[in-house]
Image (cartoon, rainbow, N blue to C red):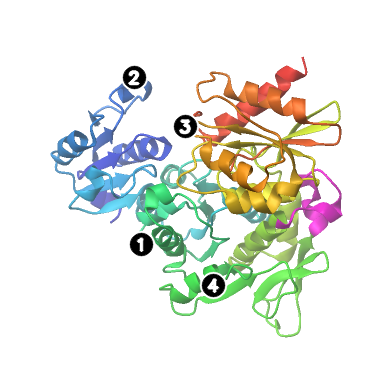
Amino acid sequence: MTIDDLRGRRVLVAGLGTSGRSAVAVLTEIGARVVAADADPQVADRVELPAGVRLVAEADPEQLAEQALATAPDLIVASPGWNPRTPLLARAGREVISEVELAWRIAPPGIRWLTLTGTNGKTTTVGMLASMLTAHGWHAPAVGNVGTPIAETVLAARGTDRPLDALAVELSSFQLHFTHTVAPLASACLNLDADHLDWHGSMAAYAAAKAKVYDRTEHACVYNIADPRTRQMVEQADVADGARAVGFTRAVPGPGAVGLVEDVLVDRAFIPNRASHAAELGTVADLAHLHQGSDADVPAHLVANALAAAALARAAGVQPADVAAGLRSYTGGDHRMQPVAEIDGVRYINDSKATNAHAASAALAAMPDGGAVWIAGGLAKGARFDELVARFATKLRAAVVIGTDPEPIESALARHAPDIPRQVVPAGDTEVMTTAVTRAATFARPGDVVLLAPACASMDQFTSYAARGDAFAAAVARMRR
């Protein structure tokens, strides 16, 4: 299906979040007849739709499905928040695709798609990758589950004199579920841990969605040697002839992998004489500006992210010197181990993007023993936190629990860190983050860190993880006045 195929066809866009609004705009611009469906009856008050778009807004899922499908769409574009059990999608009776799939179908030929997923580290890795591609001289933005929606980026580039050379594409499991024909030049899954089980219904379904990142890969499937499940995904993927598996590791790599030799990132996968040689891709010191501390203290997850990004960049033909330059110029993203302030000898760090236990574990691992006052909690998405708390109890001085349902984290703390002081912020507190930060400050001592690493999604009390992180930063700023 091309742009010409979509002109004049009726397309239903399910959900008017960021990607849904982008899909509506793109489809309208290329001449499709667009119907937009949303579960918020007041959506028209907050979303301005292009002229000619028909809106179906109904809170009742059954009524929404009936009314939307009565418009007889030829195709449905599903927003990431809509799981396949939603009545509208479950009864679709026609093809359902993601906004990413839509972008692939309207994209001009010649763009190198470099796709990556994983439970954690996606945004950092795709940012590093885009920085490497830019250092190589390419027009190659970070898109997908980060930044500008991909369909919008692709369509905008068609009308300019600067075509896209490549795309660094971050993909969530939601997007991958409804993505069917994307054929990337290279792909990667960084890691796999339980997450979004409420959306997918089971760990098996979640893993299957993540594994789709490798399907139809043309050149290199990048996997995490430390996570055998990612290698298994590659082995089971339906890839193009000639595509090969490339591992990344924080150990010394064997032939066909990228890894570390002492503090040097090296490539033994994309060089002619990889059996006996390696290409230098930068050093751990190139990452030191992304965290607080010495070069020797660069967190392990940052090194792993850099290696995965380097493997994807090298698969696309980026030169080793440009990989290193990209690492040095990458500035990091907001809400990921972001230093906010130091007050009375206490550091405040915003890791609001730690929306699951796996991500929070990376943040807690970087904390001083017994010196972390942990602000945690939110929408648990069916996850449990016993393993996380048991593993990092010795890192904690105290904990402050937020969220409309604090029980999953609070009970794990009671079982595995019973001697650690903890407070629960009442769910109805209208200034939840201000209260949390104020209480955390009463526990902290000079040399400690107040760490926002919620291990949960944000949507129970905030509009997004970014809004949650901004609330944390604002609450800390008020303490300084």
Q: Which residue lies furthest to the top in this view?
A: 481
- The residue singled out by tag 1 in the image is 181
Callout 4 secondary element: helix
Residue toward you, 396 or 464: 396
Badge nearest the viewer, 4 or 1:
4
Q: What residue type is labelled 2?
A: Asp
Q: In whole angstroms, how far apart are the C-alphas of marks 3 and 2?
A: 22 Å
Q: In whole angstroms, how far apart are the C-alphas of marks 1 and 3?
A: 34 Å
Rendered residue at 55%/24% (across/down):
426
Q: Does 379 lie within the magenta span?
A: no
Task: Point out residue 428 in the picture as x, y percentages from the top left corner.
Answer: 50, 21
Earlier residue among tags 2 and 1:
2
Q: Which amino acid does label 3 sit on?
A: Asp
Q: Can see residue 296?
A: yes
Task: Point out residue 71 in the picture as x, y percentages from the top left corner.
Answer: 15, 38
> Mark 1 near mark 3, Cβ–Cβ under 8 Å?
no
User: Which mark, by number, is residue 231?
Assistant: 4
Task: Point out residue 452 in the picture as x, y percentages from the top left corner.
Answer: 66, 36
Badge nearest the viewer, 2 or 1:
2
User: Which mark, by number, is residue 460?
Assistant: 3
Earlier residue among tags 4 and 3:
4
Badge nearest the viewer, 3 or 2:
3
> Mark 4 near mark 1, Cβ–Cβ under 8 Å?
no
Res 438 → quadrant? top right
Q: In whole angstroms, how far apart are the C-alphas of marks 4 and 2?
A: 47 Å
Earlier residue among tags 1 and 3:
1
Earlier residue among tags 3 and 2:
2
* Span of residues in magenta: 284-300
Depicted 387 relative to depicted 378: above or below: below
Rendered residue at 23%/49% (across/down):
90
